[in-house]
Image (cartoon, rainbow, N blue to C red):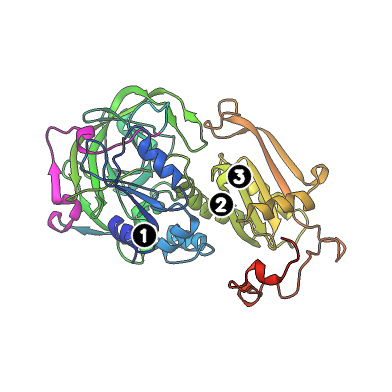
């Protein structure tokens, strides 16, 4: 398995010329993010010479849909079905002993100073400080003992103190239960895991499903875990770095601003605080960071959302063929859906199902199956030639949306759907796409002579 661990995936990227090694000395203040952003969608970046640190930094390990598909052992058209199958049938993990786990090669329990230990970058000019952006945040339900895994922005606010943005989801629910009982919530942060486990952490699941077990299902083999030193949490045994700690009850401190996925800043507000109690890391650890709003960040959030969206629409319109959360819509706000239309009105039902799937979704475009929904030129063409606003537009006002969308009123705004499907009663030639016979099979190598120069064409004037 190419993506068995963070390191085996990096080796694979290097072998396939998708890893750029940057030996020039770089600063954590913007420069790491700047170079990684320049390589976004092209190559992963490996910084060997970070100013004042011996620990290298990596970013962009999966910045295309094809990268994630390859890590999953499929193609881009099989990603959603494979992810959906794993979400529906999680598989057990395997617990290793401390001696078997690479992340246990170094264990630090005293004098913890995160900024002295690891090169944690500052990404954007208005960011409030150094942020961990690619850590799997793992907590355990004390009743069911099931773990929950997510990714949160984590601001370094002291030697062993981290500010965390907890959105009102599963981790927040467990924290509030603990806080109401007057106790902290134990947690662990795993940095530098394989891309399959990273993707599994973003699965949209009912409360009580362990995302690490989804990772096991995606890998077709048990994900190896190891127990933490100071908290009752199991973490990926091959992670580069694991921070252990507890979210403190009844304590809030300023966190933010921070550059977020919509390419705007999340505001500064008082947030929960984590106290770090232990640090584990491999020998010669590699620090992993995700640059906000880059393709890696967007796809990591978008692909699991596509799987959830597909399943929601399937309940309403069984002829759904594919869904796409487009990068231009931040992989959260814009949904494009392809269906095999069988009944009038189906496309509008798809629009309603998509908007109900996630409050983040703001605009929905529904097309016929002949439109390549991963090609935005094709999608725009469908809007241009198959849509009329007086009959194909669905608008819903005063709906809950994303609070990170600055055009909303504290997260409340309007949503819209476009029915770009061909009417079932249209004339046969009305929407028939033009085609050139043999075009798809044509190979230009059969026609173009690379050795032929323009001078040999005997042009009278040139």
* 110 part of magenta stretch: yes
Nearer to us in this view, 246 or 174: 246
Q: Earlier in the sequence, mark 2 or mark 1?
A: 1
- Look at the picture and state if 402 lies above or below 38: above
Residue 342: x and y, percent? 74, 63
Q: Residue at x 25, y 34 (%)?
A: 246
Report if residue 446 is visible in the image.
yes
Is disc 3 placed on a helix, strand or loop?
A: strand
Residue 323: x and y, percent? 59, 55
Q: Is residue 414 left or right of residue 393?
A: left
Q: Earlier in the sequence, mark 1 or mark 3?
A: 1
Q: Are marks 1 and 3 in contact (CB under 8 Å)?
A: no
Is disc 1 placed on a helix, strand or loop?
A: helix
Estimate how packed mark 1 is, as few (under 14), some (14 to 19) or many (20 or more) residues with alpha carbons within 10 Å: many
Residue beneath disc 2: 309
Q: Is residue 281 left or right of residue 352?
A: left
Looking at the rendered image, the quarter that the C terminus falls into is bottom right
The span shown in magenta is: 98-123
Q: Residue at x 19, y 47 (%)?
A: 281
**Residue 119 is drawn in which quadrant?**
top left
Estimate how packed mark 2 is, as few (under 14), some (14 to 19) or many (20 or more) residues with alpha carbons within 10 Å: many
Residue beneath disc 1: 13
Alpha carbons under labels 2 and 1: distance apart: 30 Å
Residue 278: x and y, percent? 18, 39
Q: Is residue 43 left or right of residue 307?
A: left
Residue 334, labelled with which disc?
3
Alpha carbons under labels 1 and 3: distance apart: 30 Å
Nearer to us in this view, 204 or 165: 165
């Amino acid at each position: 398995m190419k993506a068995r661990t963070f390191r085996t995936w990096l080796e694979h990227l290097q072998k396939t010329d998708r890893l750029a090694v940057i030996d020039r000395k770089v600063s954590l203040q913007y420069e790491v993010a700047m170079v990684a952003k320049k390589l976004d969608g092209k190559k992963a970046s490996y910084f060997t010479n970070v100013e004042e640190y011996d620990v290298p930094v990596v970013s962009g390990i999966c910045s295309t849909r094809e990268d994630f598909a390859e890590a999953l052992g499929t193609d881009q058209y099989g990603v959603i079905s494979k992810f959906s199958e794993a979400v529906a049938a999680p598989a057990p993990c395997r617990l290793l002993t401390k001696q078997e786990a690479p992340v246990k090669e170094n264990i630090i329990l005293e004098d913890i100073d995160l900024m002295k230990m690891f090169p944690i970058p500052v990404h954007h000019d208005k960011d409030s400080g150094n942020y961990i952006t690619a850590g799997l945040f793992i907590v355990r339900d004390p009743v069911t003992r099931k773990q929950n895994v997510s990714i949160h922005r984590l601001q370094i606010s002291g030697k062993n103190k981290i500010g965390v943005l907890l959105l009102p989801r599963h981790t927040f629910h467990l924290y509030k239960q603990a806080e109401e009982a007057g106790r902290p919530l134990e947690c662990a942060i795993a940095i530098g895991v394989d891309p399959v486990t990273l993707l599994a952490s973003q699965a949209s699941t009912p409360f009580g499903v362990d995302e690490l077990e989804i990772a096991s299902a995606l890998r077709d083999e048990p994900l190896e875990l190891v127990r933490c030193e100071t908290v009752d949490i199991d973490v990926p045994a091959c992670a580069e770095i694991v921070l252990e700690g507890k979210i403190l009850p009844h304590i809030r401190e300023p966190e933010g601003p921070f550059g977020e996925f919509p390419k705007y800043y999340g505001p500064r507000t008082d947030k929960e605080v984590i106290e770090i109690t232990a640090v584990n890391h491999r020998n010669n650890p590699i620090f992993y960071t995700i640059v906000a709003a880059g393709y890696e960040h967007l796809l990591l959030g978008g692909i699991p959302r596509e799987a959830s969206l597909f399943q929601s629409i399937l309940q309403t319109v069984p002829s759904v063929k594919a869904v796409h959360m487009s990068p231009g819509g931040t992989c959260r706000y814009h949904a494009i859906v392809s269906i095999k239309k069988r009944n009038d009105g189906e496309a509008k039902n798809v629009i309603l199902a998509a908007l109900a799937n996630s409050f983040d979704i703001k605009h929905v475009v529904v097309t016929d199956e002949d439109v390549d929904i991963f090609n935005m030129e094709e999608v725009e063409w469908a809007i241009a030639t198959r849509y009329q606003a007086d009959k194909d537009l669905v608008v819903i006002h005063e709906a809950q949306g994303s609070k990170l969308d600055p055009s909303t009123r504290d997260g409340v705004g309007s949503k819209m759907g476009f029915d770009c499907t061909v009417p079932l009663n249209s004339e046969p030639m009305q929407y028939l796409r033009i085609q050139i016979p043999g075009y798809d099979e044509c190979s230009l190598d059969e026609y173009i002579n690379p050795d032929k120069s323009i001078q040999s064409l005997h042009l009278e004037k040139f």
